[in-house]
Image: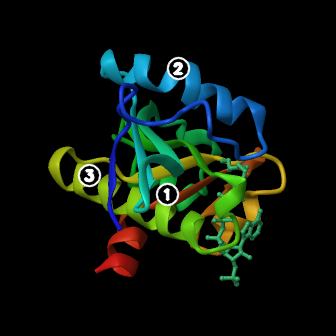
């Protein structure tokens, strides 16, 4: 399996339904535009039987690092860091749910972010989880921010340790 960059001419964005309208709409309306402007990058996993069908997708970008919401030891360690990687969105179509694709997409996204950090240096990856999905990320070592249970982080050091 391999993710590819979303191609609006090829991928069936309208057929995608993960059950969360905001995530469906982002894929339909915004993802390709934002990618064209180099603001975000959206990767999709295609169904091998019909490669225009999207099994799932994720969107990556960078955000300013708000140190104040981190545990004190990380605040000190990363006090000169300016940015963090962000998994801005991640979703699996309902037809493919519960078959391990969400986990596979998350690991694929973390591989890409680790490579990005190896190239430019940033210390954390952050995810804004939708309500009820925080536990999905915590299974992989993400930790909720002190000020918001639905916003979680993991250090690049931990990602490197678990992926290598
Ligand atoms: C959350 C989501 C990505 C999971 O995708 P999925 O392909 O169904 O999940 P997987 O089959 O890979 O599940 C992997 C493991 O995580 C668990 N898991 C799945 N969804 C979970 C959730 N919401 N909370 C806690 N654990 C969850 C599964 O039980 C499975 O555990 P197991 O290996 O012990 O059986 C998917 O349900 C989805 O797209 N939901 C709607 C969109 C959304 O809310 N996205 C998150 C926004 S940030």
Which is closer to the viewer, label 1 or label 3?
3
Q: Which residue is drawn at 38% across and 36% down?
A: 6
Q: Quadrant of ligand 1?
A: bottom right
Q: Does the residue labelled 2 lie within 8 Å of ligand 1?
A: no
Write the residue at 62% across / 40% down. 16
Please provide percent x and percent y for residue 31: 48, 26
| SS class, disc 1 | helix
From mark 1 to mark 2, how far is it between C-alphas?
34 Å
Of labels 1 and 2, the one closer to you: 2
Vertical placement of residue 96 versus 128, above or below: below
Q: Name the residue under label 3.
A: 117
Residue at image coords 32%, 61%: 2
Q: Which structural element holds mark 2? A: helix
Quadrant in which the N terminus appears: bottom left
Helix, strand or loop status at disc 3: helix
* 131 with respect to 146 (left or right): right
Q: Provide the residue designation for mark 2.
A: 30
| Residue bearing mark 1 | 74
Q: Of all residues shown, which one is farthest toward the front?
A: 49
């Amino acid at each position: 399996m391999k993710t590819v960059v979303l191609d609006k001419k090829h991928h069936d964005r309208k057929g995608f339904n993960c059950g969360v309208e905001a995530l469906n709409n982002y894929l339909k309306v915004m993802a390709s535009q934002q990618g064209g402007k180099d603001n975000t990058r959206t990767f999709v996993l295609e169904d091998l039987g019909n490669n225009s069908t999207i099994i799932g997708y994720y969107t990556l970008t960078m955000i300013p690092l708000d140190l104040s919401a981190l545990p004190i030891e990380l605040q000190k360690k990363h006090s000169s860091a300016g940015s963090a990687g962000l998994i801005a969105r991640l979703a699996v179509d309902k037809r493919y749910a519960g078959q391990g694709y969400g986990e596979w997409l998350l690991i694929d996204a973390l591989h890409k972010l680790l490579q990005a950090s190896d190239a430019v240096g940033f210390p954390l990856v952050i995810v804004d989880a939708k309500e009820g999905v925080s536990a999905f990320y915590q299974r992989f070592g993400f930790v909720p921010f002190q000020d918001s249970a639905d916003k979680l982080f993991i250090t690049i050091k931990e990602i490197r340790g678990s992926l290598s």
